Amino acid sequence: MSENKTEAAPRPAKPKRKPKKSQLPVALLVFVLMVVVGILLRSRSSQVSMFWVFGGCFGFILQKARFCFTASMRDPVLTGTTTLTKAVLVAFAVSTIGFAAIKYSAFAGGQPIPGQSFVQPISFATVLGGVLFGIGMVIAGGCASGTLMRVGEGFAVNTLALVFFIIGSLWGAHDMGFWSVNFVANGKKVFLPDVFGWFGAVVFQLLLIFVLYIAADLWERKKLHITDDE
Amino acid sequence: MEEFWKKISKNRYYIQFFKNPFSYVTGAVLLALFNIAIFAYSGNPWGVTGTFANWGAWLYRLFGGNVDKWYYFSSASAQTTLENGFLNNTGSWQNIGIIFGALLATLLASQFKFKKIKSARQIVAAVCGGLLMGYGARLAGGCNIGALFSGIASMSLSGWVFAVSLFAGAFIGSKLLTKFFM
Amino acid sequence: MMAEFELDCLGEVCPVPLVKAQKKIASMAVGDVLTVHIDHSCAMKNIPDWARKEGYNVEVEEVDDGEWDLIIEKNK
């Protein structure tokens, strides 16, 4: 790292830069490639092809918005800003409403509720896993989605992190017998609509998100000393 | 041809949609909508890291290892996924799609650059961080997407417990980062 | 007297550029200007976001493909 201090000097004339070359032709090429892959996958299975499309959309959105779950958890403490924390809460609120609608319509129609494997047992493994993951994502500079997105952006560091992410996953899978028998199996699954009823669960969760949003905003105002008199 | 690209790069709507970043909240709403859409389409919400364990298993097999006796891969559905292979695995294509989607977005903004590793510190950080995330995600049954985003959206208390744990981990991580990795 | 400072954060990964910029700004006097060189696409969003909340003047200049100069004036 170099730090130069130029005392009160006039800003030096900018060095003449070579004109930027547009990357749009390459972008077009990549887009065509993605479409071709999609069509080829369709001949294999339309579901695989559809997941490819969804993945592309997720990656595009993540990069365009520089959406970073790591920053949403890290920045309140480290830098005092909570812009991303608040954005993540918005994502939670919007998705809660959509998920509730899908789940309830299945329930009301007497169908099994979809996606219930994501309602996981709560145990010491959940807490320890969360803490380890939290430490890892801050040090590596990207969570799961963030690491993939930054591989696409051309970061060698995140590519290395992805390799060890995969190794770590395999390691975790290897030890899962121990964790499952001793902890996960004794954990309790809590699906909020079972506790508060469907309507109550949605209201409870949205209220919780609302309170957290305000807390995050007040936290930022306090940390950055933002006042309204300007 | 060069003129043509130059003309496009000055276009108002190109700048609005492809050059300038979206706001964080725009990203949040779009991600939520697409998570709802994939849930409606496939019956399961968005997840990322379960696939990483499968990638690990396939790579391990390439090196002559065998995971069939492992508890994690012993269920019938896990075995079917492994047998069907990488090319038929929806999660794998979704994850690769994320990489390509991000690449496309960067190129469309004409902002792509290979960023080399700068120091040994960064290598240590990436190795440790990657391992911790991989192991942690298996323990908690998911990552910031499957266990946090989709978990909370599924109105599961485990999502909130995971969120609090992540926050605690991020706090410890921040301290480590400023102490050792800066 | 106004002073100018530079911070080379090329190759640094989030949140390092933001934390360094915050530390640097804190050590500067009102009226000083800081230029941060970055090539992390997230930093071109989160540093201006923070600086504008602090009430500083910020200018983002794209100097090359995937490289930016952030010019922050500590005007208060």
Image (cartoon, coloured by chain):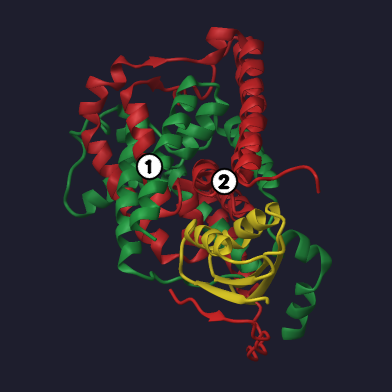
Q: Which mark is residue A133?
A: none
Pointer 2 with pointer 1, Cβ within 8 A:
no
Find chain B in the image and tell me its colour.
Answer: green
Q: Amino acid at mark 2?
A: Gly
Q: Is residue B65 visible?
A: yes
Who is closer to the viewer here, A86 or A93? Answer: A86
Q: Amino acid at mark 1?
A: Ile
Residue occupied by mark 2: A80
Q: Check disc 2 and report its element: helix, strand or loop.
A: loop
Residue occupied by mark 1: B172
Residue at point 27%, 38% (across, down): A172
Tag 2 and tag 1 share a subunit: no
Residue B139 relative to residue C40: left or right: left
Residue B174 relative to residue B139: left or right: right
Q: Quadrant of residue B17?
A: bottom right
Where's residue B166, x and y in %? 43, 36
Who is closer to the viewer here, A161 or A77? Answer: A77
Q: Quadrant of residue C67?
A: bottom right
Find chain C in the image and tell me its colour.
Answer: yellow
Residue that sits furthest to the front in the current view: C1
Q: Chain of mark 2?
A: A
Q: Check disc 1 and report its element: helix, strand or loop.
A: helix
Query: Where is B15 relative to A146, above or below?
Result: below
Query: Where is B1 relative to A23, above or below?
Result: below
Locate the C terminus of chain C by quadrant. bottom right
Query: Where is B111 relative to A46, above or below?
Result: below
Q: Is residue A112 visible?
A: no
Who is closer to the viewer here, A206 or B77? Answer: A206
Find chain A in the image and tell me its colour.
Answer: red
CA–CA distance in space, label 2 to label 1:
16 Å
